[in-house]
Image (cartoon, rainbow, N blue to C red):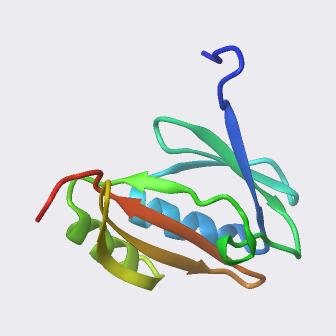
């Protein structure tokens, strides 16, 4: 149920719906709904979002928001990201709030960048 004045949905530009869907289904088990040639939505079990068809894309390198996913087992999650077609941008490293890594997902038009963190769980 939507909560007043809280993030309810997030949408990203995308050049290849099938490649993005394949990656997130394999790596994280997300569910998708196709809404035609211009939009595909997803749910990860916590938040709903979507991908809209676009030739342009945003990147954290150019100031876009950084999306962070939580993982209880960072090494296993990194392995799933790579096995699902993701590319490592930065291997696991420590930061004041825990450990994280950065990855990208190659599509025909752009890279989708993400970050996984374990929020304080030390290995």
Decide which of 59, 23 is in the foreground and name it: 59
x, y percent for residue 1:
60, 15
Q: Quadrant of residue 76?
A: bottom left
Residue beneath the point at 72% across and 64% down: 64
- Eyeballing the image, is 117 above or below 58? above
x, y percent for residue 100:
34, 66
Q: How many marks?
A: 0
- Image quadrant holding the C terminus, namely bottom left
x, y percent for residue 103:
48, 76
Q: Is residue 7 left or right of residue 56?
A: left
Residue beneath the point at 58% across and 72% down: 113
Residue beneath the point at 87% across and 68% down: 54
Decide which of 49, 102 is in the foreground and name it: 102
- Eyeballing the image, is 111 above or below 64? below
Q: Quadrant of residue 16?
A: bottom right
Q: Is residue 31 left or right of residue 50?
A: left
- Eyeballing the image, is 104 above or below 49? below
x, y percent for residue 92:
30, 76
Q: Quadrant of residue 80?
A: bottom left
Q: Is residue 40 left or right of residue 19?
A: right
Residue at the left extreme of this rendering: 123
Decide which of 116, 107 is in the foreground and name it: 116
């Amino acid at each position: 149920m939507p909560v007043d004045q809280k993030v309810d949905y997030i949408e990203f530009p995308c050049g290849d719906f099938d490649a993005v869907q394949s990656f997130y289904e394999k790596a994280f088990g997300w569910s998708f709904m196709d809404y035609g040639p211009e939009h595909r939505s997803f749910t990860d079990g916590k938040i709903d979002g979507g991908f809209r068809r676009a030739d342009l894309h945003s990147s954290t390198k150019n100031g876009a928001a950084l999306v962070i996913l939580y993982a209880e087992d960072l090494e296993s999650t990194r392995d799933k990201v790579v096995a699902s077609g993701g590319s490592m941008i930065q291997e696991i490293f420590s930061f004041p709030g825990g450990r994280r890594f950065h990855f990208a997902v190659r599509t025909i038009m752009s890279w989708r960048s993400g970050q996984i963190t374990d929020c304080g769980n030390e290995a």
